[in-house]
């Protein structure tokens, strides 16, 4: 049976202009948690975490959160947070998944900013061999 649990290489595509929004390695754990390492400078905040649940036989929803930083600040002070909400479906062959995402930026006090990006993602499973 196809499962989301495992390590994936994920490409996020911005719906507005079809540009690459992000390129990441994403680890989904059997306990319903998730960890992502994005192709971004560590000083800006390239690591984030999430929680997920199944919504169907091969479908899953993820709520993902992280900190955003100003890399030029000596103490790398957080400037905002973000959420990334996904709805994905694993392929029957268990080697890929695809879906849609919504990325939002939030002020540190929890109020929303005008930043919102929607798009699609395509992932390929990473295995030992």
Image (tube, rainbow, N blue to C red):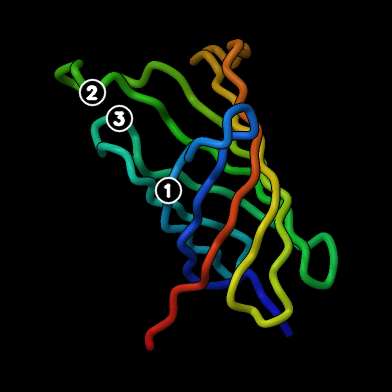
Instruction: Determine crowd level at label 3: few under 14, some 14-19, many 20+ residues with C-alpha closer than 10 A.
Output: some
Q: Is residue 18 above or below residue 113?
A: below
Q: Which residue is mark 1?
A: 23
As displayed, is residue 98 above or below residue 90?
Answer: above
State how far apart marks 3 and 2 are (Cα). Answer: 5 Å
Foreground residue among 38 and 53 = 38
Compared with 81, 50 (above or below) is below
Q: Earlier in the sequence, mark 3 or mark 2?
A: 3
Q: Which residue is mark 3?
A: 44
Q: Position of residue 57 (x, y in %)?
A: 83, 72
Per the model, the C-alpha gap separating discs 1 and 3 is: 15 Å
Q: Which of the two marks, 1 or 2, is nearer to us in this view?
A: 1
Q: What percent of the width, then of the height, locates residue 16?
A: 63, 27
Q: Quadrant of residue 29?
A: bottom right
Q: Quadrant of the N terminus?
A: bottom right
Q: How many residues crowd around disc 1 within 10 Å: few (fewer than 14), some, or many (20 or more)?
A: some
The reply to whether callout 3 and callout 2 are in contact (CB within 8 Å) is yes
Element marked by disc 3 = helix
- Per the image, the residue denoted by label 2 is 71
Per the image, label 2 sits on a secondary structure element best described as loop
Mark pair 1, 2: CA separation? 19 Å
Q: Residue at x 43, y 81 (%)?
A: 127
Give the residue furthest to the front: 17
Mark 1 / mark 2, whichever is N-terminal? 1
Please name the residue shown 29% across and 19% down the image. Answer: 70
**With 7 as the anchor, is 54 left or right in this view?**
right
Q: How many circles with numbers are drawn on the protein?
A: 3
Residue 92 point in image, percent of width and height = 73, 79
Describe residue 30's horizontal placement relative to residue 70 as left or right.
Answer: right
Q: Are marks 1 and 3 in contact (CB under 8 Å)?
A: no
Precedes in sequence: disc 1 or disc 3: 1
In front: label 1 or label 3: 1
């Amino acid at each position: 049976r196809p499962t989301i649990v495992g390590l994936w290489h994920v490409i996020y595509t911005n719906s507005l202009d079809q540009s690459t929004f992000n390129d990441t390695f994403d680890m989904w754990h059997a306990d319903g948690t998730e960890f992502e390492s994005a192709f971004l400078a560590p000083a800006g905040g390239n690591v984030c975490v999430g929680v997920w649940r199944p919504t169907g036989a091969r479908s899953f929803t993820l709520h993902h959160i992280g900190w955003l930083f100003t890399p030029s600040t000596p103490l790398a002070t957080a400037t905002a947070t973000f959420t990334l909400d996904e709805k994905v479906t694993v392929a029957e062959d268990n080697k890929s998944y695809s879906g849609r995402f919504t990325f939002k930026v939030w002020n540190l006090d929890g109020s929303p900013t005008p930043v919102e990006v929607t798009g699609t993602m395509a992932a390929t499973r990473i295995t030992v061999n």
